[in-house]
Image: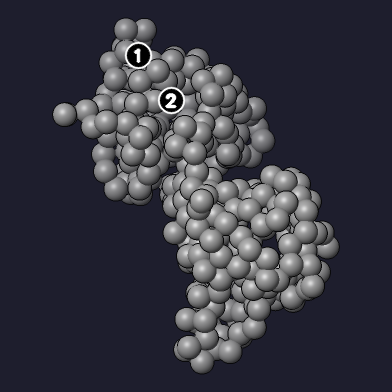
């Protein structure tokens, strides 16, 4: 049956960074968002949602905010939205939404933060994409259904390259990883090109693990001996747990091809429910490394989801 709640308000805004205003109905467009809302588009954050209870708790501090003040499109009563895992499905009438992100980074122009000194949307708001369109009005019933445990694994690919980031070199490693992951049935939720800057990498790893709840994040590059090669250090900094066997196996198998594999410093770790694996920077090494581990990763990722038996029974 799923969790049941009620839509208290439907809100839109004509410009980003402004508080949304309640409307009599929202026209939801598949793959886009709500008609006439500034935040609609083809990305993964097409619709924003917030629990009514979260707003009421905030207002008990004397804030006095109104519906739509946090930039939410849908204010829902009766469901603790922030506890829903990414991939959950929400249904209201003919409209079907799938959650894509929990929380967000609050931008400097956030109107509610300027007015009250705080904003709960980064902590308790969620975002969704529109799978099926239609109309939603205040008072409509809404149900929330947890994700299918057999859904495809969701992966993101990050390439670390100063020259690639500056446009001086074409990124071939990232696309090579994407091609192999897609071929193995993964859903790719992001491809990112960054310079060899540890803080930028950590920020993306936090976002992909905590907000997007990716099953797997693969990085390429920054694992050598150069002073700018800091990918392993950034990865270890965000880790909750180590998963060294994956990186060790990649090095072991790679040394059957070249002795220089002993110089690779890549690591493999777990943050919350996300596995993060560092790969070397060359397209050839990316293909070889993924080829070594892809078949076995499935069991580990299922275990992270809670869908596989523990190994040590």
Measured as percent of width and height from the top left, residue 248 is found at: 27, 24
Q: Residue furthest left?
A: 313
Q: Residue at x 77, y 59 (%)?
A: 135
Marking on residue 65:
none
Q: Residue at x 58, y 39 (%)?
A: 190
Which image quadrant: the C terminus? Answer: top left
Q: Residue at x 37, y 44 (%)?
A: 273
Q: Is residue 245 left or right of residue 115?
A: left
Residue in the foreground of this view, choosing between 42 and 299: 299
Residue 177 visible? no
Q: Residue furthest top?
A: 256
- Is mark 1 in CB contact (under 8 Å) with mark 2? yes
Q: Secondary structure at mark 2?
A: loop
Q: Is residue 45 above or below residue 177?
A: below
Residue 296 visible? yes
Measured as percent of width and height from the top left, residue 85 is found at: 47, 51
Q: Is residue 50 left or right of residue 19?
A: left
Q: Residue furthest bottom?
A: 62
Give the residue pinned by disc 2. 280
Give the residue pinned by disc 1. 254
Measured as percent of width and height from the top left, residue 298 is found at: 39, 25
Q: Is residue 36 above or below residue 236?
A: below
């Amino acid at each position: 049956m799923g969790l049941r709640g009620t839509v208290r308000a439907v809100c839109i805004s004509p410009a980003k960074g402004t508080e949304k205003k309640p409307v009599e109905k929202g026209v939801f467009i598949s793959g886009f968002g709500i008609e006439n809302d500034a935040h609609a588009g083809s990305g993964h954050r097409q619709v924003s949602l917030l629990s009514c209870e979260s707003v009421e708790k905030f207002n008990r501090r004397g804030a006095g905010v109104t519906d739509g003040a946090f930039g939410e499109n849908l204010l829902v009563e009766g469901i603790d939205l922030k506890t829903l895992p990414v991939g959950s499905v929400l249904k209201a009438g003919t409209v079907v939404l799938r959650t894509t992100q929990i929380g967000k980074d609050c931008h400097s122009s956030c109107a509610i933060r300027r007015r009250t000194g705080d904003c709960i949307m980064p902590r308790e708001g969620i975002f969704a994409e529109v799978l099926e369109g239609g109309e939603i009005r205040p008072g409509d019933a809404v149900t929330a259904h947890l994700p299918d445990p057999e859904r495809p694994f969701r992966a993101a690919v990050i390439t670390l390259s100063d020259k690639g980031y500056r446009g001086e070199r074409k990124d071939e490693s990232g696309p090579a990883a994407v091609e192999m992951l897609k071929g193995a049935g993964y859903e790719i939720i992001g491809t990112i090109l960054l310079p060899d800057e540890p803080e930028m990498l950590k920020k993306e790893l936090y976002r992909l693990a905590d907000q997007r709840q990716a099953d797997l994040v693969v990085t390429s590059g920054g694992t050598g001996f150069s002073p700018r090669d800091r990918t392993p250090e950034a990865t270890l900094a965000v880790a909750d747990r180590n998963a060294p066997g994956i990186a060790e196996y990649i090095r072991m198998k790679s040394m059957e091809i070249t002795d220089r594999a002993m110089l690779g410093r890549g690591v493999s770790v777990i943050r919350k429910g996300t596995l993060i694996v560092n790969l070397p920077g060359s397209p050839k090494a990316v293909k070889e490394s993924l080829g070594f581990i892809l078949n076995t990763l499935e069991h580990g990722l299922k275990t992270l989801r809670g869908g596989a038996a523990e190994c040590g029974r």
